[in-house]
Amino acid sequence: MAHFATKRYNYWGQLGILAVFCGVGLIFGGFISLIPLIGKIHLKDLSGGSSAAIMDKILVPENATALRWMQFISTLFLFFLPPFFYALLCHRKPWLHLGFTHKVDIKQAGVVILVMFASLPIVGALQELTELIPWSKATLLQFKEAEDAYNKQVAVIARMDNFLDYLVSVVMIAFLPAVFEETMFRGGLQNLLSRWFKKPILAIIVTSIIFSAIHGSYLGFLSRFALGFVLGWVYYRTGNIWLNIIGHFFNNAFAITMLFISTKPGAKTDPSKIDDHFPLWFGVVGIALVYWLFKYFEKISKADIDRPGEEVLIPGYIDTNNPFLANSENIGDTHQS
């Protein structure tokens, strides 16, 4: 399979370009995402009072559709368009670089879904472990207030009075965020860092930390980090973004489905009713299952040769673009991009 060199941007430049596109996406997405609310809420309601009071006026069931569109627009501009334009500018074959042109092997996809299912006990155990940490009462109260605020948003956006609402939620809250977030964090950021550091595991860890932190959940930080690491490993071993999207979508869709099943028709959606805590020993069992599944995943994925961080090294070529390897010898970086 042919390999193509990256366009003339060093790694600092590529990171800067990606960061600038994210900043622009955040600003434009923030403004454009307000469009669905026009006519739904008066401008005077957005001025004066605390931010919590303003959010209470916005987060009402009548605004459910508008809020779903707001989330779609904001995540599109923040998580999908920046890595796409970054790849378009920095790499000769942007879709190939991000991992969208790979075919999906049914066996691989099935194992990824099983991995995500086996990760649920790990996620629940880490949630329990986080709350066992001896936080101060004030800190723990602040964390729980943040979780309550997040649950209020989910309660409105994921409002499901019937099966049609459920399908809409699966698309808007499970599928699209999976596509957008995986494109940004695995296809964009992790891909860049793994090629840069030449230490893929470090790239997975750094990306997972950022992935978890950007969700703004203190009590769920370790849980999302674990999910980010699992998804990062899948991308590292295959370079196939579709497998990541499938895994991420399954995780989101499973939560939406549990929420739909647990909510009585016409009742208010309450995400806090879903108990996502597991005993710590469940987490140990989950780790064992995930490890075994990944061993099998390795076996059926040996044919994948485009593994970010394991690019072809050209003997005698020094990659002066990489500040982490500036003094190394016989280092090169050509890859499918």
Image (cartoon, rainbow, N blue to C red):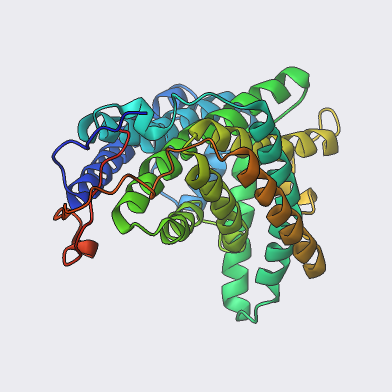
Q: Give the camera-side residue of 304 and 67.
A: 304
The answer to whether residue 80 is visible is yes
Q: Give the camera-side residue of 84 and 214.
A: 84
The answer to whether residue 268 is visible is no
Measuring from the top left, give residue 244's x and y in whole percent: 55, 38
**Please, is residue 153 above or below residue 219 in the view?**
above
Q: Residue at x 44, y 24 (%)?
A: 101
Left or right relative to 220: residue 26:
left
Q: Residue at x 65, y 70 (%)?
A: 130
Q: Give the camera-side residue of 81 and 265.
A: 81
Measuring from the top left, give residue 257's x and y in whole percent: 76, 34
Measuring from the top left, give residue 2's x and y in whole percent: 32, 29
Q: Residue furthest top?
A: 164
Q: Residue furthest front?
A: 315
Left or right relative to 264: residue 62:
left
Please identify the quadrant where the N terminus is shown: top left
Left or right relative to 79: residue 66:
right
